[in-house]
Image (cartoon, rainbow, N blue to C red):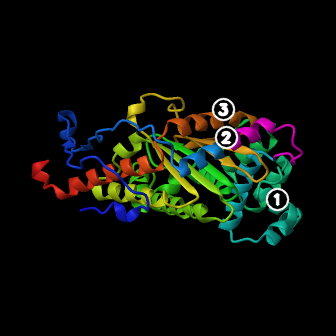
Amino acid sequence: MLDVHASSTASVSRTSLNSTVDISPDRAGRGADTIAAPRRRERSNTPKSPRSTESQRHVQGLHARLSCQGRSEVPKFAGSQARAIGAEIRRARDSLDWTLDQLASATDISRSTLSRIETGARRPGACEVASILTALSVTGNTKERLIRLAGDEAGTWVGIGTGMAQQLSAVAAYEAEAHSIHEFQISVFPGLLQTAAYANALIATSPLGSAARDRAVFTRVERQSALSRTGLRHYAAFVDEAALRRRAGTDPRLMADQLLSLIKANSAPTNSIRVLPFTLGAYWGCEGPFTLYSLHDDHHVVYQENAGSGVFIDDRAAETYVRVLRNLEDIALDAQESNALLAEYAERYAHVLRVPQEQL
């Protein structure tokens, strides 16, 4: 029997776990068995748990700060162009094992300026980027794209390239700086909450070669250290029930372990993981996933990932996403209800393991 209680400090109340595995005729031939959705109870009218109320106040605070932007005296935000360029310059420098001093000597750009460029605190000009990339032996399409990005006018939408490495380096820069992170996912679990086995199963579906897949899995798991940073005060994830239902890999144990990992993560005082159940039907925001980063200088950046590419949305345009988050706060299951639903699905995947294959 799978011990779901051992992985959570919350009291998990569940409906009957004697569910069956639903293999529809059109899918049975492909061996793609699915987990039946748990029978849903009516939502109670009891007050939200303290954790959920605290999370809601946090989102309301984001909205208030965004409404005040333009009247504050904070320094001008360098923008996602600067962050994306800086992240890729740092990655190129690290690949050569160069220090900032070595790069400064090769470019005649001061060490302090290079440091500010790499951290995104200063937006470099096209000539500076060209000089830095030449010194780092970066050529071809990557060089052309970054020089073009440096020459673009500061804007709301910032594409960060088509490669997974470019996506991860830019996203990791925000994860390392943000004081709060809010994620919304529909089909899969957020990368910061994925187990190594779950991440490997997802990335294995891509056309990447085995070596590239291994690097991508390692990088994704390594990024999760951002959740233990002292500077990160709050992490919230909203996950549609579809992610619980969609099986990754062929081993049901993988999904059971992933779900129990989410329950464990939900016990951390700075974390809030809440599920949007199927019973909601369609809701505002269900059209697409996104991540909102709140930075130390009261600026907010939204990241939207597409197939093989990603886009950053800066400042005032992020206000729409804050309103979506407020709606998700209102309609999602609270922490205890979410843990209960996660536990139900974990038990159902464990049930697949316990039942002999010929009985399925």
The residue labelled by disc 3 is: 320
- When asked about the image quadrant of residue 39, the answer is top left
At 69% from the left and 54% from the top, the residue drawn is: 178
| Circle 2 Cα neighbour tier, 10 Å, few/some/many (<14 / 14–19 / ≥20) | some
Give the residue type at disc 2.
Gln
Query: How many numbered marks does the figure carry?
Result: 3
**SS type, badge 1:** helix
At 14% from the left and 53% from the top, the residue drawn is: 357
Segment colored magenta: 60-77
The residue labelled by disc 2 is: 60
Give the residue type at disc 3.
Thr
Q: Position of residue 173 (x, y in %)?
A: 68, 56
| Circle 3 Cα neighbour tier, 10 Å, few/some/many (<14 / 14–19 / ≥20) | few
Give the residue type at disc 1.
Arg
Q: Which mark is residue 116?
A: 1
Q: In the image as oriented, which residue stretches furthest toward the front? A: 46
Q: Quick check: can you spot residue 230?
A: yes
